[in-house]
Amino acid sequence: MPVKPLNASSLKALLERIEYARDGEIRSLILHSATSIEIRFSVQDSARDYDWIDTAFRIDGVNDAKLLSDTILKTFDMSEGITAEIVNSGTCALALGNYSGRISEAPFYIIGTSLGYEELPFSG
């Protein structure tokens, strides 16, 4: 399934559906190129009676990022979930933790020009 683009309202609906990935697990971080990064989470989906699924977020047009090593990502505390934002100026961002309005303060963040997602089978 191809990556589906997100806008502000569809992003909000998705984040609510997966409860902001709270208590989920980070599965992988893939650098497609210097300006395209994908992060994959295992999350519970309220639309599927809280069944586990994987959700991959892809940020294109990356112009700023603070990444962590794979070993740190695998053990990152996801109790605060993720923050993802799309602003009208054509900027989008994703961060680990609750950093609404202050993404660049997060220990891990990606800022770019477009954000999309893909639903995948659970990789448990």
Image (cartoon, rainbow, N blue to C red):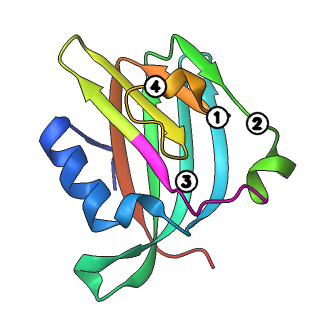
Q: In the rendered view of the protein, which quadrant contains the C terminus? A: bottom right
Which residue is label 3 attached to? 40
Q: Position of residue 92 (x, y in %)?
A: 35, 25
Q: Which residues are magenta?
A: 75-83
Instruction: Find numbered disc 2 in the image and state the secondary structure of the residue it sits on.
Output: loop
Residue under the point 82% across and 48% down = 72
Instruction: Find numbered disc 1 in the image and state the secondary structure of the residue it sits on.
Output: loop
Q: Is residue 73 above or below residue 114?
A: below
- Tell me the kind of residue under disc 3: Arg
Q: Is residue 24 magenta?
A: no
Q: Are marks 4 and 3 in contact (CB under 8 Å)?
A: no
Which residue is label 2 attached to? 68
Q: Return the residue nearer the eye: 83 or 40.
A: 83
Q: Earlier in the sequence, mark 4 or mark 3?
A: 3
The extreme bottom residue here reads: 49
Q: CA distance from mark 3 to mark 1?
A: 14 Å
Which residue is label 1 attached to? 108
Q: Are marks 1 and 4 in contact (CB under 8 Å)?
A: no
Q: Is residue 99 above or below residue 11?
A: above
Residue under the point 40% across and 58% down = 20
Instruction: Give the left or right position of residue 79, taking residue 112 as reference.
Output: right
Q: Are marks 1 and 2 in contact (CB under 8 Å)?
A: yes
- Tell me the kind of residue under disc 4: Arg
Which residue is label 4 attached to? 102
